[in-house]
Image (cartoon, helix red, strand yellow):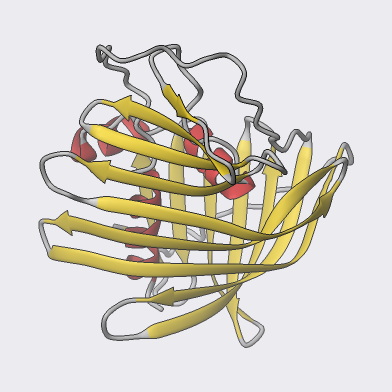
Amino acid sequence: MTYRALTCVLLSLLLLACSKKTVPVITPAAPTLDIEEINFDYFHGKAKMVFRDEKKEREVKANIRIRKDSVIWMTFSVIGVQGGKVLINKDSITVVSTVDKEYFVFDYKELSKRFNFEVNYQTVQSAILGNLITPKDESDVIVPGPSFNVLEQHRNDVTIRNYINAASRKLEKIEMKQKDSNNSITMNYSNFQPLGDKIYPYNGVITILYRTTAGLLNNTIVLEYNKAEVGDKELKFPFNIPRKYDRR
């Protein structure tokens, strides 16, 4: 997988950030919907990631570390050889390709303008943890069901439907659709296992259908964890960019 492609995928994931609020005339959400979310100081996970598009399938090993509300650090390798790394903080996202000897830096203001969404750090962190990607608001709607309670949210021209398992209180599915373009992102979480005093989805599938200036982006990302830990033990986030690397 080229890291231009990885960058494209990361940008697509960032389309989940759409926290600017409108005030639609709908029934206020009842404050009784209970969602179990992961709370932590530090998170460390190791996973296999598979990227699929209409032409190829690529597999990488990912090492992921998070310091809550501060920094997300990732490294990627193929057959034991490191191919790239990503640093996501409150100000920007930096993607480094050790294969192509180049790097990309994106700030949230630029991304928000490009995609007409308010892109932020919190959304990326929440998507990784299987938490709500945008907080509940009094204008949201709750639709109770026997198996799933659906939390429907409207942010700008995007409708977000969150499917919360009625028994476990865990978020299992997110459907996002943009009104005019029909661009969509669907996230499915499964294989819940204990993590601290909560349960965590060890498997995830992200399906992206989004029109860009380069054409239609149609990707599937499969994430399979083999290790996930939370705690208060401090983790390190080593990150440097060699001077000879070109900025793109």
Q: Position of residue 14 (x, y in %)?
A: 38, 45
Residue 219 sits in quarter: bottom left
Q: Position of residue 162 (x, y in %)?
A: 47, 39
Asked if residue 240 lies left or right of residue 138, the reply is right
Q: Which residue is drawn at 50% across and 21% down?
A: 136
In the picture shown, does residue 160 fall above or below 211? above
Residue 96 in view, yes or no: yes
Q: Where is residue 155 in the image (x, y as percent from the top left)?
A: 30, 26
In the picture shown, does residue 1 fall above or below 122? below
Residue 246 in view, yes or no: no
Residue in the foreground of this view, choosing between 45 and 83: 45
Which part of the image, by quadrant, shows the N terminus?
bottom left
Asked if residue 233 lies left or right of residue 199, the reply is right
Q: Residue furthest front?
A: 146
Residue 7 sits in quarter: bottom left
Residue in the foreground of this view, choosing between 66 and 131: 131
Q: Position of residue 44 (x, y in %)?
A: 76, 53
Residue in the foreground of this view, choosing between 224 and 71: 224
Q: Residue at x 59, y 46 (%)?
A: 147
